[in-house]
Image (cartoon, grey):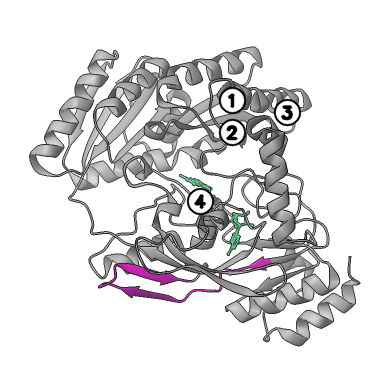
Amino acid sequence: MGDRAAVLADLAAVLPDGALVADSHIVEAYRWDRADMVVPGTPLAVVRATCTADVQATLRVAAAHRVPVVPRGAGTGLSGGSTAVDGCITLSTVGMRRIRVDPAAMVAVVEPGLLNVEVKDAAREHGLWYPPDPSSFEICSIGGNLATNAGGLCCVKYGVTTDYVLGMEVVLADGSAVRLGGRTIKDVAGYDLKRLFVGSEGTLGIVTEATLRLRPPPPPATTLVATFPDVIAAGGAVTEIVGRVRPAALELMDRTAIRAVEDRTRMGLDRSCGALLLGRSDAGGAQAAAEVKVMERACEQAGADYVASTDDQDEGEQLMAARRMAIPAVERLGTVLIEDVGVPIPRIPELVAGVEAVAARRATLIAVIGHAGDGNFHPLVTFDRHDPDAVERAQIAFAEVMEVALALGGTISGEHGIGTLKRAWLGPQLGEGVLDLSRRIKQALDPLGILNPGKAL
Ligand SMILES: Cc1cc2nc3c(=O)[nH]c(=O)nc-3n(C[C@H](O)[C@H](O)[C@H](O)COP(=O)(O)OP(=O)(O)OC[C@H]3O[C@@H](n4cnc5c(N)ncnc54)[C@H](O)[C@@H]3O)c2cc1C
C-alpha cells in the first residue's frame, strides 16, 4: 500500500481544485452507508469526481500506489457496499450530474451522480418515464442503482435497472475507459459486458455514464388495499394474484411494519390487522378494472378481512408512500439488520412462515415488508444494539432467514447486493464452481484487487 503523503501529492497533482478531500472531519461522513452494523475502515482521502477524467486520474494514481478505491454514490446502500476500507480512496461520483434526454430515441444519457428521482423528472419533462423505482428513489443515485442493479415497487411489471440500460461508459481499474453497449434496443454484438458491470457493486469498474431506455408513461393507476389476519394468508393471496395478472406493484407489510408506519404518519392504517397488501393496476380503463377485480377476489379467497380500491391518485400515492416509509419507520424501533431474500413465487407462504419461526426461536422482532409480487422480501431484524445478548440473537436470526430462503430455492439478495454484510452466505448460494468463476473474472479485470476489495465476493 502506497505512502500516504505520496498518494495525496499525486492525487493533488492530477485532480482539479476542490476534488481531493483529506480533512478528517469531512472524510468521516464517507465511512458508512446505511448498513451501520458493518464496521467501517477510514479512508485516506475522498475524491469528489465531477467528470470521467477525474475518475480516470484517480484510478491511475491508485493503481500506481496499489491503494484500494471504494466507489460511492449517495451512500443509501443497505449492504455495506460503499463502506470504507482502511487506507482507501473513497471515490464519490455524486458530483457527476450531466443529463441529456433524447425524446426521439427515447433514451436519457446520464452521469452517475443524478438521483433516481431527477432522472424520472427529466424524462417526465419530455412526456416519458424512467420506471425503476427503489423506495429510496428520492435519495439514491443512478450510479448506485446501476452498481446494485436496483429494483423497486414497479419492477414486478416493468423490470429492474438492468432492463433499462442500453449502454454504459465504465472506467476500469487501470484508469482506461470503455464504452459498452450503445443506443439500440437490440444489440448482440460481442459478449453482453454491460450486464456484467450492472450489479457488480463497484468491484469491476466505475460507472461514469449510462444510456437509459425510457418508455411512455402508463395510464393513472388504480390502487387496491387489503388487510389480512396474518402474513401467511397475505402470502397466499400474492401467489394467486401473480398467477393470474401482472400487477404494476404488489407490496406487503406485516403488523409490526404497519404499526411503525402508522405511528409515524397517523394516516389511519388498521393497527390491529396482521398484514396489509397493496396492489396496483396501471392497465387503464376496463382492463384495469378487470385486473383489480382479479386481485380483489384473490384477496377475499385467501381470507382478507378488508378489501378496497381507489382511482384517486393522491390516495393511491399516499398508500404507496406509506409502504416506502416502512424501513425508516421500523428503524425507530431499534437497530435493524435488513434482509433482502427472494424466493420463487409459490414458496412465499413458506418463506414468511419460516421467518416467523426464526423470530420466535431467537426471541427477536422481525418486521416483514417486501416487493411481494417479485417474491422479494425485506425481513427487518430489529434489536437493541446496546444489549450484547440481543445483538447475538439478531445476528443468528439474520443468518437463519437467509438459510430459510436458500432452502426454498431462493436468493440471499434480490436487489440490495451482497456488499460486506452478506458475503459469508454467497458461497452457500452460488457454490464453489461459480464463486471461483466470479473470482477469475474479478482477477482478469482488476488484477491488483484495488476496486472495492472485500465487497460482493
Ligand atoms: C429507505 C431505503 C429504501 C430502499 N429501498 C430500496 C428498494 O426498494 N430497492 C433497491 O434496490 N434498493 C433500495 N434501497 C437501497 C439503496 O437505496 C440502493 O441500493 C441504491 O441503488 C444505492 O444507491 P446509492 O447512490 O446510495 O449507492 P451507494 O450506497 O453509495 O453504493 C452502492 C454500491 O454501488 C457502488 N457504486 C456507487 N456508485 C458507483 C459508480 N458510479 N460506479 C460503480 N460503483 C458504484 C458502491 O461501491 C456500492 O457497492 C433502499 C435504501 C433505503 C435507505
Instruction: Tell me the CA gap for discs 2 and 3.
Output: 20 Å
Q: Which residue is mark 2?
A: 412
Task: Look at label 2 and name its amino acid.
Answer: Ile
Q: Nearer the viewer, residue 443 or 155?
A: 443
Task: Look at label 1 and name its amino acid.
Answer: Leu
Instruction: Tell me the CA gap for discs 1 and 2.
Output: 7 Å
Q: In the image, which is nearer the foreground, mark 1 or mark 3?
A: 1
Q: Which mark is residue 406?
A: 1
Task: Look at label 3 and name its amino acid.
Answer: Val
Q: Which residues, given as a range, are shown in magenta? A: 91-110
Does residue 62 lie above or below 383 as drawn?
Answer: below
Q: Residue furthest front?
A: 189
Q: Nearer the viewer, residue 210 or 39?
A: 210
In primary-sequence order, the first of circles 1 and 3 is 3
Secondary element at tag 2: loop
Does residue 172 lie above or below 282 as drawn?
Answer: below
Q: Which mark is residue 391?
A: 3
The answer to whether mark 1 and mark 2 are in CB contact below 8 A is: yes
Q: Which residue is mark 4?
A: 149
Q: Quadrant of the N terminus?
A: bottom right
Instruction: Tell me the CA gap for discs 4 and 3.
Output: 30 Å
Instruction: Tell me the CA gap for discs 1 and 3.
Output: 23 Å
Instruction: Tell me the CA gap for discs 2 and 4.
Output: 15 Å
In primary-sequence order, the first of circles 4 and 3 is 4
In primary-sequence order, the first of circles 2 and 4 is 4
Q: Nearer the viewer, residue 186 or 149?
A: 186
Task: Look at label 4 and name its amino acid.
Answer: Asn
Q: In the image, which is nearer the foreground, mark 4 or mark 3?
A: 4
Q: Residues within 10 Å of mark 3 (few under 14, many from 20)?
A: some
In primary-sequence order, the first of circles 2 and 3 is 3
Instruction: Tell me the CA gap for discs 1 and 4.
Output: 21 Å
The answer to whether mark 1 and mark 4 are in CB contact below 8 A is: no
